[in-house]
Amino acid sequence: MDFEKVIKERYSVRKFQDKPLEKSDIDKIINASHIAPTGCNIQPQRILVINSEESVNKLKSCTKCHFDAPCAFLICYNSDETWTRPYDGAKSAPVDASIVTCHMMLEAHNIGVGSCWVMHFDPKKMREEFNIPDNFTPHALLVAGYPHKDSVPMEMHEKVRDINEVVYYDSF
């Protein structure tokens, strides 16, 4: 699919078919995460694939925003593996995890898999339910599945600010 078409047509899917994701589709999404750029190519991302019935039920205890998706990807970062900006100590790992999540989300759409990036989850509960090590920080949850035939973008999906409100040249 043409990249511009992917980024224009992709939307947050919140209604999924009651059908598991094919392993080949999961693999394509994971492969997209694996080639995403990270600070100094340190690759701090750690991804938990949640796709068994037992795991999905655990997920439902961690967020109300699971949308009954048959699969989810919990994108974490290893806080022990991050590039640090020398000027102010800012860490690249949270940004890296976001880039990885974007790659996954766009590849999912590219192959006909719907997804929704969820930030509304309880990280402490995630740690408990999925035995997440202390040095792994749960960053983003990408729920995924094949879109239901009734799935449509939210009304506000098409609404964007005027480009001149968000882009500046040379100074603010």
Image: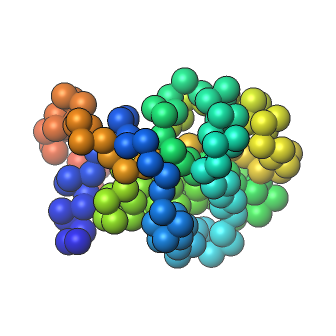
Question: Is 35 situated above or below 80?
Answer: below
Colour scheme employed for the rendering of this structure: rainbow
Q: In this image, 50 relative to 171: left or right?
A: right
In depth, the one of 46 and 44 nearer the eye is 46
**Residue placed at 31% from the left, 64% from the top?**
110
Residue furthest toward the front? 19
Inspect this view and state whether residue 90 appears: no
Residue 97 found in image quarter: bottom right
Residue 43 found in image quarter: bottom right
Q: Position of residue 88 (x, y in %)?
A: 67, 51
Q: In this image, 100 relative to 122: left or right?
A: left
Question: Is 136 situated above or below 57?
Answer: below
Q: Position of residue 24 (x, y in %)?
A: 49, 71
Please state, as top left, top right, bottom left or bottom right, where the N terminus lies in the image: bottom left
**Residue placed at 37% from the left, 56% from the top?**
113
How many numbered tags mark residues here?
0
In depth, the one of 100 and 169 nearer the eye is 100
**Residue placed at 75% from the left, 57% from the top?**
78
Q: Position of residue 144 (x, y in %)?
A: 46, 48
Please state, as top left, top right, bottom left or bottom right, where the C terminus lies in the image: top left
Question: Is 92 situated above or below 57?
Answer: below
Q: In this image, 49 relative to 5: left or right?
A: right
Q: Position of residue 3 (x, y in %)?
A: 24, 68
**Residue placed at 38% from the left, 40% from the top?**
16
In depth, the one of 149 and 85 nearer the eye is 149
